[in-house]
Image (tube, grey):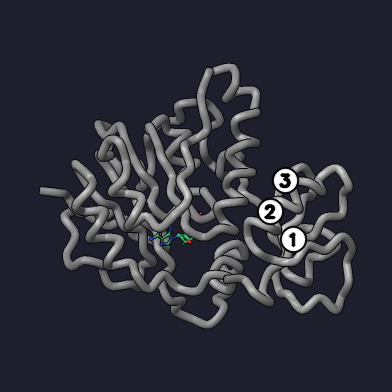
Amino acid sequence: MYHGKLAVLCLQQDALSEAICLAQRLDVPLYQEINPAFPELFFLTWRDGCLKLLDKALLKKGGLSVDIEPRYGEQHSWPAPKKGVLAQAIGRKTKTVVDATTGWGQDSLHIFRMGYALRCIERSPVMHALLEDGFKRLSNKDWVVQLGLKAPELCFGNACDVLSTLDENPECIYIDPMFPAKRKKSALAKKSMTVLRDLLGDDEDKAQLFAMALKTATKKVIVKCPDYAEPLAGRPDESFKSKLLRYDVYLTR
Ligand SMILES: C[S@@+](CC[C@H](N)C(=O)[O-])C[C@H]1O[C@@H](n2cnc3c(N)ncnc32)[C@H](O)[C@@H]1O
């Protein structure tokens, strides 16, 4: 799957057994020192207490990890107030949410911090490994421990399959698939999303995922999309707009 594209880089002896397991699980090479002649473009490594994804320019420092801190402007308490366009789209009365396209977990963590009961699905083995690490760090946060909370449950696999195996259908399913970029390498695109696109490409099966989500959710499906994109499934029942994004809400009937 990642042949010639990805490797695990382990520069700390104490992370070696974890690195061996990860390299085996992803079926990619494991390196224990930096060599500028590496053929791969992306690397997973442990740095600053996190699992990080690096491109070649970041071999010595930096990298991207699942950021578990509240986003700018978000309240640090739990549950944070249900305000903003995402909360409006989910609704105050909704209790259970499944994020079917978890990615870097930023929307998931926002939903979690607002107090919704959340389950997460991710099909990319690399993103799943990064999320596992992020959710583990979240579980160990003082406020999470003190409040007796648990990090969201994380399921690995294609949501089209996983959704049909859930023990209880959620009220709301949230999907944020990768849409084709409007401009080449937009200056506005976040580094984390550019890397995700370079590593995984666009999600070509979004219509299939939407159909499965609509069959499974008991109340609604929310599709997050860029403002320039056509609605994924025709005219939505409601739409909530922010600066460059739209949350299209389809009610299940
Ligand atoms: C645009 S990113 C999501 C970003 C995320 N909302 C965030 O806040 O970081 C899309 C992610 O969904 C995943 N994905 C797309 N289709 C999927 C599917 N059918 N099942 C599971 N994961 C899927 C991709 O692997 C990718 O990691």
Kindly indicate whether the residue at mark 1 contacts the one at mark 2 (C-beta within 8 angstroms). yes
Residue 76: image quadrant is top right
Please state if 11 lies on the left or on the right of 152 as rendered.
right
Q: How many marks?
A: 3
State which tag comes first along the sequence, 1 or 3.
1
The residue that mark 1 highlights is 8
Give the amino acid at mark 3.
Cys
Mark 3 CB lies closer than 8 A to ligand 1: no
Q: Nearer the viewer, residue 250 or 54?
A: 54
> Distance of mark 3 from mark 2, alpha carbons?
14 Å
Q: In percent of the image, x 23 and y 45: which residue is there?
A: 217
- State the SS at label 3: strand
The residue that mark 3 highlights is 50
Task: Report ligand 1 position as a quadrant.
Answer: bottom left
Residue 80 in picture, x, y percent from top left: 46, 30
Front of the two marks 1 and 3:
1
State which tag comes first along the sequence, 3 or 2.
2
Please state if 55 lies on the left or on the right of 60 as rendered.
left
- State the SS at label 1: strand
Label for residue 22? Answer: 2
Residue 39 in picture, x, y percent from top left: 77, 79
State which tag comes first along the sequence, 2 or 1.
1
Q: In percent of the image, x 83 and y 59: which residue is there?
A: 61
Q: Can residue 214 be seen in the rendering of this structure?
A: yes
Mark 3 burial class by Cα count in 10 Å: few <14, some 14-19, many 20+: some
Give the amino acid at mark 2.
Leu
Q: Nearer the viewer, residue 28 or 150?
A: 28
